[in-house]
Amino acid sequence: MRFVYIDENFSDAGGHNADYALGILSACEKREHSCAIYANRRLDSSFLSFSGIIPVFSIKTSTLHQIGLGRGLGRLGQAMRLAYSNISHGLDLLRKVNIGKDCSLVLIAGISPRVTLAYLVWFAYLSLIGMRTNIAILLHDQAPGFAGLELRLLRMAGFRQKIDFAAQSPSIAEQFRIRFHEPICIMPMPMVDHSRRKPSAEGAGQIRKEKINVLYLGLASSAKGFGFLVDTLTSCRAIDALGGALKFTIQYNPVKGDELAKQAGERLSAAAESCHMITVLRGPLAKDAYETQLVMADVMILPYDPRCYRYIQSGIITQAIAAGKPLIVSADSNLEKEMQLHGSGISFEYGSPASFMDALCHLVDNLDDFSGKAALKSAAYLQMHGPAAYVAKMEAMATGRPE
């Protein structure tokens, strides 16, 4: 089979976009499929040697709010940025994305509402030139307004294509089923590396003899509760918890434009200088370093704001569950549902330092029990996710069996 994978936000060496793309490319090669991955034009130089990765798109839909065009002009400026984004993205799709008549499936890793018009024009163009192929669109809950009407318009524009819709979270799939009134295929998360998810008994025992390692990985953003976590950990109660039996390892990888998280990062750095219990990992981590931190963790904390993660799936919780790590997650979030179904851990009331500390203390007091349950569930979870499982779903969509 021949696949086309489109992710205009794939450019950096670190992060989930790179993990997704490289995992899919590798799995396709193992299954003897051809795969072309169309990425952002600012692709990291380390990817230029990959024959299947093609830098094309001039903008990132994840950072459209940072475009300076029309700033200070209010709604007119917003309209100018929207028009620029659609024109730029549309030209990139029309001029540089080569589908070909032998393409089995085009998988689009999310369509931002800000560039829906560009995809409408592209789909219509493919239909008018008689191009027939299967298209799968991965849905995200990034904008409540992106629902039934937009999806129907996309399907109307691509009237010669077979278009399926998919989601990486059962919660998102259910929301779109309600809005769109048709089945949504649930996709696995493709970044899980099956071969490197089992920590050695020697390594785990060494950590346990010293201190219990509590780990936060990922972007330092307000949506992921970074500020709340920092404020909680730098309080006296957190530092003195359990008689100094804990070690907190916190990745500080700031998100551009998130001033609250940036200020929290400064407070965290100041606290780490005077507290041996806090270790700060600065910036994005290389893949090996990231996986090493994951393996050496005893507990993973994901204090995400449930208002932002009520439906969205998290790549980090997928990795943590697959690695057999006990979790502390925010209540009333999709992460809590994922943990209850497939993992082991405890939830807390977001915004309440007392609730977080109670959850942490309870988990640590019963760590062996939580760790045992997490390890038992991880094997089954690994079978559900990973690049191979993802490509298997792509094969099913290409042959008309998306469910």
Image: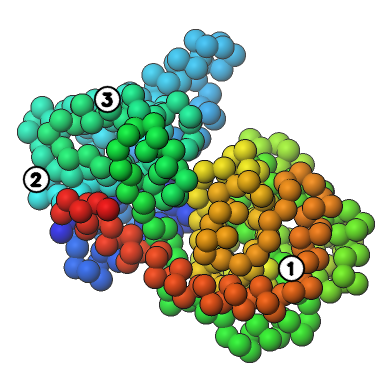
Q: Residues within 10 Å of mark 1 (few under 14, many from 20)?
A: many
For the point 74% across and 74% down, the residue is 366
- The amino acid marked with disc number 2 is Lys
Q: Nearer the viewer, residue 264 or 138?
A: 138
Q: Answer whether labels 3 and 1 touch (C-beta < 8 Å).
A: no
- The amino acid marked with disc number 3 is Leu
Disc 1 designates what residue? 363
For the point 66% across and 73% down, the residue is 370
- The amino acid marked with disc number 1 is Leu
CA distance for labels 3 and 1: 48 Å
Q: Residues within 10 Å of mark 3 (few under 14, many from 20)?
A: some
CA distance for labels 2 and 1: 55 Å
- Left or right, 242 with respect to 347, comes to right
SS for callout 1: helix
- Left or right, 109 with respect to 65, comes to left
Residue 153: mark: 3
Q: Answer whether labels 3 and 2 touch (C-beta < 8 Å).
A: no
Q: Position of residue 38 (x, y in %)?
A: 30, 47
Disc 2 designates what residue? 101
Q: Position of residue 119 (x, y in %)?
A: 29, 30
Q: Answer whether labels 2 and 1 touch (C-beta < 8 Å).
A: no
Mark whose residue sits in front, 2 or 1 = 1
Does label 3 or label 1 sit earlier along the sequence? 3
